[in-house]
Structures are given as C-alpha cells and as structure tokens.
Image (cartoon, grey):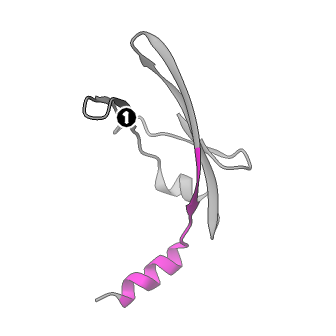
C-alpha cells in the first residue's frame, strides 16, 4: 500500500496501526492506514498536490486491488505555525 505524487515519488504505509473492517451499517469495506508525516511532507508541495493511494488486500480469499486519487491543500509548516500563534 503506497501513496504517490504525479512525479512518481512514493511513500509506503506504516505497518501499524492499520485495520480492515466491514461496515454492516453501510455494506462497505473500510481500511485505515497511516503514513509517516515527514515522508509525505517530502513529496507534496504548496499550494496543492494530487496524491494517489494504491494497494491490494485479501478479502474472502480473493485479492482486491484498489486505487484512488484526490487533490489536497498543502499548508506550509511555517504558515501553520503562524496561524496557531495568532489563536488564543
């Protein structure tokens, strides 16, 4: 399971914590994974970056391959720190 940017740079998911569960409520398989913040920060650029997550997992003895993309807003750490200092 990895995320990648349009330049082909990738960051693998951390092995823990992670989980795969089935929601009886909505009938959809759900996956939770986390990524190293610094590694992701190294492959994104302000003001926005498109990231793709792709991978596979076993479900009922069959492999499920998936991929999805979205564009995220990237807030530089300096800007984030400046905004948080102004809040009191």
Instruction: Report which residue position mark 1 lands on.
Output: 30
Q: Nearer the viewer, residue 7 or 72?
A: 72
Percent of width and height locating residue 49: 63, 59
**Residue 53 lies within the magenta run:** no
Give the residues in magenta.
Answer: 69-86
Badge 1 crowding class, 10 Å Cα cut-off, few under 14, some 14 to 19, many 20 or more, is few
Q: Please report the residue visible at 43 percent of the width from the left and 84 percent of the height from the top.
A: 83
Give the side of residue 57 with respect to residue 19, left or right.
Answer: right
Q: Quadrant of residue 53?
A: top right
Q: Outermost residue, left direction?
A: 25
* Whether residue 88 is visible: yes
Q: Please report the residue visible at 51 percent of the width from the left and 80 percent of the height from the top.
A: 79
Q: Quadrant of residue 88?
A: bottom left
Q: Please report the residue visible at 55 percent of the width from the left and 53 percent of the height from the top.
A: 40
Percent of width and height locating residue 6: 71, 49
**In this picture, is 72 found above or below 17?**
below
Secondary structure at badge 1 equals strand
Q: Nearer the viewer, residue 37 or 61?
A: 61
Q: Outermost residue, front direction?
A: 26
Q: Outermost residue, right direction?
A: 7
Percent of width and height locating residue 3: 57, 43
Percent of width and height locating residue 50: 64, 54
**Residue 85 lies within the magenta run:** yes
Q: Quadrant of residue 45?
A: bottom right
Q: Please report the residue visible at 42 percent of the width from the left and 45 percent of the height from the top.
A: 34
**In this picture, is 65 found above or below 74?**
above
């Amino acid at each position: 399971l990895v995320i990648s940017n349009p330049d082909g740079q990738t960051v693998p998911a951390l092995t823990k914590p992670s989980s795969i569960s089935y929601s009886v409520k909505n009938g959809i398989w759900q996956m939770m994974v986390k990524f190293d913040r610094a590694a992701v920060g190294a492959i994104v650029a302000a003001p926005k970056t498109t990231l793709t997550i792709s991978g596979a997992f076993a479900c009922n003895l069959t492999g499920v391959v998936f991929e999805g993309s979205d564009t995220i807003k990237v807030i530089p750490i300096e800007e984030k720190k400046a905004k948080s200092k102004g809040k009191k």
